[in-house]
Structures are given as C-alpha cells and as structure tokens.
Image: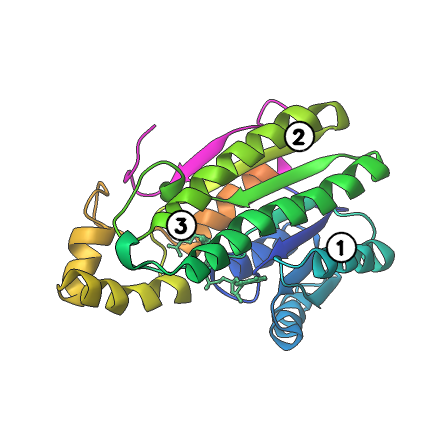
Amino acid sequence: MSLKGKTALVTGAASGLGKRIAEVFADAGAQVVVADLKQADAQAAADAIASKGVKTMGIAMDVTSEQAVDEGFARVQKELGAVDILVSNAGIQIVAPIQDFKFSDWKKLLAVHLDGGFLTSRAAVRQMIASGRGGSIIFMGSVHSKEASKLKSPYVTAKHGLEGLAKVIAKEGAQHNIRSNVICPGFVRTPLVEKQIPEQAQELGISEEEVIKNVMLKETVDGEFTTVDDVAQAALTFASWPSNALTGQSLVVSHGWFMQ
Ligand code: NAD
C-alpha cells in the first residue's frame, strides 16, 4: 500500500494514535504534516519521521480555531502542495456522570472533536477539489461511535456525530474523487486512556485493574487492548484505497468489543 507522491496531514499527531499513523504513512512514502497544539511537540514528531527520508512538516494547529486551521492548511499548500489525505484525529477525553458534567467541559469536548472534524475536513476538501486529485478523509471515531459507556456523554455524542459528517462528505465528495471514512478503535493504551484509568476507578469506586478488566476490555473477545499499529494499518488502508468503492464506511478495530 504505497502513498508515494501523496501529502498527508494528521491532527493530534504528536502523541498516541496520530503519531503512529504519521510514522506508518511516512513508511509508505507520503510527505507528512504533523499538526498538534504546540509547535515544539509537532516539530519534534515531524523531525523524528524525517529520518525515514520523506519531507515532513510540524505545525501548531488548534483544531477548534477556524483561523489556525485555515492558516495551517494554507501554509501546507504553499510548502508541500495540496493535502491528499487528512486524518482528523485530535481528541480529548473528560469523564463525569451527566448530572455533574460542567457545560464548559461539554462544549470543550465537542469543540475538539466536532468543530475540529468540520474545520479540518472543510479545509482539506477545498484543497482536494482545487487540486483536481481528490483524496481521502479519515475521521478518528471510536467504538463509542457505535456504543455508549457510562461517564462519557459528550464523547459518545461527538463520536456518533463524526459518522454523520463522514457520510455527508462521502456523498458530496464522490464527484471530486474524495472519499471519507471513520476508524472506530477499541481501547488503546495511549496517554488519553492512561489518564482515564485512575479517573474511572475513582468515579466508579473500583480498582484500576477492575477498570481495565471489567470496564475497558470486558466485551472484547480476548481481553486484549487494541494497539496503535492496528489502528495505523486501518488508516493506511483507507488512505491508499484507490476508488470510491470504500467510502462512507466505518471500520471497527476493537478485538470484537463491537460487532457490526
Ligand atoms: P493522545 O492524548 O495520545 O493524543 C491526542 C493528541 O491530540 C495530543 O497530542 C493532543 O495534544 C492533541 N490535541 C488535543 N486537543 C487538540 C486540539 N484542540 N488541536 C490539536 N490537537 C489537539 O490520545 P489518542 O488516544 O492518541 O487519541 C487520538 C484520537 O483517537 C482521539 O480522537 C480519540 O478520541 C481517539 N480514540 C482513542 C482511543 C484510545 O483508546 N486511545 C480509542 C478510540 C478513539
């Protein structure tokens, strides 16, 4: 699965899933833009990938800011050319029971996942139409695009919402050869999840081991975490798929936690 000659932009790519996806895309020959909140973090991750022999760029891009997203995409177009692949991956997690959920936290979480998904995909679609090449848009959903869990009202809402956005872009984008899909991982041990383990233990009044065994991995077929590599391979498949045969879809990568 080659991405030679393609330019890929991955948001939230200084850490976790995004970081691994950026590395795997570089291994497949793509020029890779690492976008994240802090310039220094994005640059460090981009520099690490540059050793693979592809052009890379690290940019500070808060995906909730229209100005930051539009200026970031303009800079990429100028320096590397139009974006062919977007992975809208940046995300955060905040857990609390709904009766205690602060409205400010609800809005913060929806802004990163939904505003971020909209702003980055709009910017990518504009470049993909203008280049005449089309491209592939990949949203980072979750099993929580399909299922609910306690304590995660805005996260589950946002991840379900991204499926709708991806399907609309699949319909509107087809005539421009733009594909749009969602990856739905189960739990992966990234910083986002490591932080949640003690938080959920406290909220639910159980041990951290019980959170892992009885909350996070309970419904999997084998009690295993999904890995960053599993998710990066799914991203590579969507990124390199050559036709509109694979669009408007979501792929669940979760050790069977959710079955379609
Ligand atoms: P992570 O915390 O390791 O990485 C998230 C990255 O997003 C960080 O580098 C962070 O700085 C960046 N980010 C946060 N807010 C941002 C903003 N406003 N603008 C730009 N960047 C921002 O987490 P991760 O587990 O790698 O999560 C990546 C994505 O995968 C998220 O969308 C998350 O919801 C999703 N996901 C994760 C899991 C999991 O188990 N880890 C499972 C399903 C889905």
Q: In this view, does 154 lie to the left or right of 222?
A: right
Q: Distance between the residues labelled 3 and 1?
A: 26 Å
The answer to which image quadrant residue 112 occupies is bottom right
Residue at image x 66%, y 38%? 136
Looking at the image, is 238 positioned above or below residue 58? above
- Tell me, yes or no, whether the two marked residues, 2 and 3, touch with CB atoms within 8 Å: no
Magenta residue span: 240-260
Residue position marked by numbered label 2 in the rendering: 242
Q: Is residue 187 magenta?
A: no
Q: Is residue 181 left or right of residue 169?
A: left
Earlier-in-chain disc, 2 versus 3: 3
Q: How crowded is mark 3: few (under 14 residues within 10 Å), some or many (20 or more)?
A: many
- Disc 2 under 8 Å from ligand 1? The reply is no
Picture coordinates of residue 90, whole percent (x, y) = 54, 57
Residue position marked by numbered label 3 in the rendering: 154
Q: Say how the picture is coloured.
A: rainbow
Q: Distance between the residues labelled 1 and 2?
A: 27 Å
Earlier-in-chain disc, 1 versus 2: 1
Callout 1: helix, strand or loop? helix
- State the residue in front, 62 or 97: 97
Residue 153 visible in the shown view = yes
**Magenta part, dominant SS:** loop
Picture coordinates of residue 10, whole percent (x, y) = 62, 55
